[in-house]
Image (cartoon, rainbow, N blue to C red):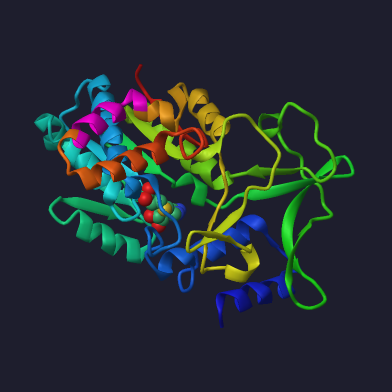
Amino acid sequence: MSLIDRIKQQILQDGYVTVAALMHQALYDLQDGYYQSKDPVGKDGDFITAPEISQLFGEAVGVWCLQQWQQLGSPDSFYLVELGPGRGTLMADVLRTVRVVPAFMKGASVHLIEVSMPLKSRQKQTLATYNIRWHESLESLPTDKPCIVIANEFLDALPVRQFQYTDAAWHERVVRMDNEQNMMFCQMDKTTHIGNAYLPEESAVDGNVLEICDAAHSLCVKLYKRLVEQTGAALFIDYGYVDNAYGDTLQAMKQHKHTAVFDTLGKADLTCQVNFGIIRHIAEQQGLHATLNSQRDFLLQFGIRERLATLYKNTHAEQQQALLVAYQRLTSPEKMGLLFKALSIASTH
Ligand code: SAH
C-alpha cells in the first residue's frame, strides 16, 4: 500500500492525524519516507543548501570549529559531530579547513548522525579518505568527551506541531478527510494550553497559527546536557525567526519549487522555519552561552570575505564570476543572508 493510502487509512481509523505525525511519516517512514527514497540535495534533487552553493560556507564553519576548540582549551581528544550531514560536503569542507591546525585533526573523532540510507552512502563517498562513524540518532554517540557539533538545515526537518486559535483557545491542527476522500487541514475540538514561553507578545486573534517543534526541543535538551557535562559547543544554521511569531510555515519543496503538501507526501521535502528564540532559551536555561546572528554576520565574522578574496585571486576568470554569485547568495540580505540564522552555543565563553 502506498504511503498516502496508509496515511488515509490511519485517518479513517483514528479520525485524524496531527500535522506533526503527518510530517513524521512523510519524512521518516522506513519504507517510503522522503529521506529513504533518494538523495534530495543538489541541482538534480529538490533543494540546494549553503554548503552545496560554495565551499566558502563550510570554510567559515571550519574556522568556527577551530575557535570553539581553542576556547575549550584545545582538548587532545574530542568528538566532531554533524547532525544531518546531507551529502557530506559541509564536513569535507570543514575537515579541509581545520587541517591547518594538526592538533585539532589529531584529536577529532568524526561522528555523523544520519537517518537516510541514500545520503549515508553519499557521505561515505564524499568522506572516503576519513575515518568516520555513523549513528542513527544522538543516543548512540559516546558521552565521555567534549564535543563540537554542527548542523545546517537539520532542525527545519524535524516534525512540528501546529495549533490554531479559535474562540479564545488553542486547538491542535490535524488532517482529516473531506467527503471526496481528500485530505484537508482541520483542528481538534479539544483545546490545548500553550505555555507563555511559546506565545508572541501580541495577543492572538482567530485564525492565528502557532508552531511548536517538540522534536527539536527534546533533541536540544539532550545535546545541551552533554555540552554542560562534558563541555563543548554546537552550531545550528537554518532558516527561521528569533521572536515567537504566529504563522503557518510548513512548506513542501520538489525540484526547487513549492508544491502542495498533500499531493507530494513522501516525494517532496517538508520543512518548517526554526524558532531560534526557543532553541536559544533552552540553552540559556542550562547555563550555556548562546550567540545568535544572521547567517550573513556569522559568515563575515568567520572570515568569508577574506577567503573569497584569496580564492578569487587564485581562480580562472570564468570561475571568478561564479564565486561572486555564490558569495552574494550566501550573504546578501535579499537572499539567504538574513532569513538564515546561526546560533552558536558553548559551555565556555
Ligand atoms: N546539512 C546538509 C543536509 C540538509 S538536509 C546540508 O546542509 O546540505 C537534512 C539532513 O538531515 C539530511 O541529511 C537528512 O537525511 C537529515 N535528517 C533529517 N532528519 C533527521 C533526523 N531526525 N536524524 C538524523 N538526520 C536527519
Which residue sits at x=42%, y=30%? 296
Q: Position of residue 55 (x, y in %)?
A: 27, 43
Which residue sits at x=27%, y=64%? 121
- Residue 316 drawn above or below residue 125: above
The picture quadrant where one finds residue 258 is bottom right
- Image label count: 0
Which residue sits at x=41%, y=41%? 329
Q: As drawn, is 137 to the left or to the right of 311?
A: right
Q: Residue 126 in magenta? A: no
Which residue sits at x=59%, y=45%? 213
- Residue 61 drawn above or below residue 254: above
Q: Residue furthest right?
A: 167
Q: Which of the image's four quarters has the C terminus?
A: top left
The picture quadrant where one finds residue 301 is top left
Prevailing secondary structure class for the magenta stretch in the rendered image: helix
Q: Position of residue 75 (x, y in %)?
A: 19, 27
Q: Residue furthest bottom?
A: 1
Q: As drawn, is 6 to the left or to the right of 81?
A: right
Q: Position of residue 293 (x, y in %)?
A: 46, 26
Q: Position of residue 195 (x, y in %)?
A: 71, 34
Foreground of the two, 257 or 193: 257
Q: Residue furthest front?
A: 317
Q: Residue furthest top?
A: 349
Q: Residue 307 in magenta? A: yes
- Residue 63 drawn above or below residue 43: above
Q: Which residues are magenta?
A: 300-312
